[in-house]
Image (spheres, grey):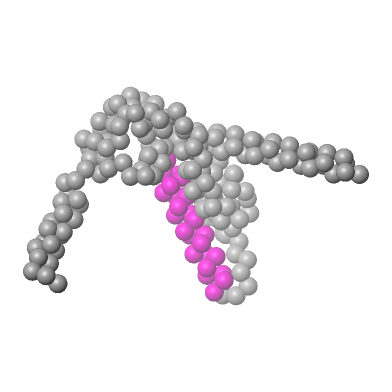
Amino acid sequence: MDDNSGIVRVVGQELVDYSKEAAEFSAQRGLVEELFPYIWTAARRMSLRAVSVWLKEAQNISLSPNTLSRAMRNQKKYWLAWGENIEPAARIFAEAQGMTAENVMDMDGEEFYEMFLHGTPSISGREETAQQHEIWDYEAAADTLKSDWFGLPDEARAQCLVYLAIERRESEAKEAEEEKASAAEGSAEK
């Protein structure tokens, strides 16, 4: 190493310290996606400009009103991404409780907590280690649902469910259309 290595380390550490304390939290890829349900809920009560100002002043997060506006215009993308992040946990929890993921996501928070606290999950593993892993998966799924789904405002969860239902119907219609076309091709070949 040369003579500047000590100075470089000091400068580097000061830069890291500064970034932790004073630097502006920039609009990283995915930040809008992660905050979207909260931005959407706040935007129902205040302007996107006011949301942007609050994020900047209170949290030192820079998301321009234009960025927020684009997100609101393309909300299907954000709701579907949010739902896709939650659905694996909902499936694990639902399977252990003998229900569907959709039913879990449709529950209100009190129902979920009651089921989590007093319900008995069904564990199918034959070996003790497999059973333990299923229990851990169930508990992790419940934690994800508690924080990332039931931690959302009710109106945000309801809005996400609307988009998930629309996507499910569109997907089912597309599959039915593909099956119909495939069947028509099969009968035309005969």
140 lies above or below 183 = below
In this image, 77 relative to 28: left or right?
right
Residue range in magenta is 129-153
Residue at x 49%, y 64% (from the top left corner): 136
144 lies above or below 181 = below
Residue at x 54%, y 35% (from the top left corner): 163
Does the segment drawn in magenta span residue 146? Answer: yes
Residue 67: image quadrant is top left
Q: Position of residue 92 (x, y in %)?
A: 56, 56
Q: Position of residue 186 (x, y in %)?
A: 85, 44
Of residues 119 and 188, the one nearer the viewer is 188
Q: How many marks?
A: 0
Of residues 168 and 146, the one nearer the viewer is 168
Of residues 32 and 182, the one nearer the viewer is 182
Does the segment drawn in magenta span residue 148? Answer: yes
Residue 33: image quadrant is top left
Q: Position of residue 145 (x, y in %)?
A: 47, 50
Residue 40: image quadrant is top left
Of residues 38 and 76, the one nearer the viewer is 76
Query: Is residue 117 in sight in this rendering?
Result: no
Residue at x 45%, y 28% (from the top left corner): 73
Q: Position of residue 70 (x, y in %)?
A: 40, 30
76 lies above or below 90 = above
In this image, 116 relative to 65: left or right?
right
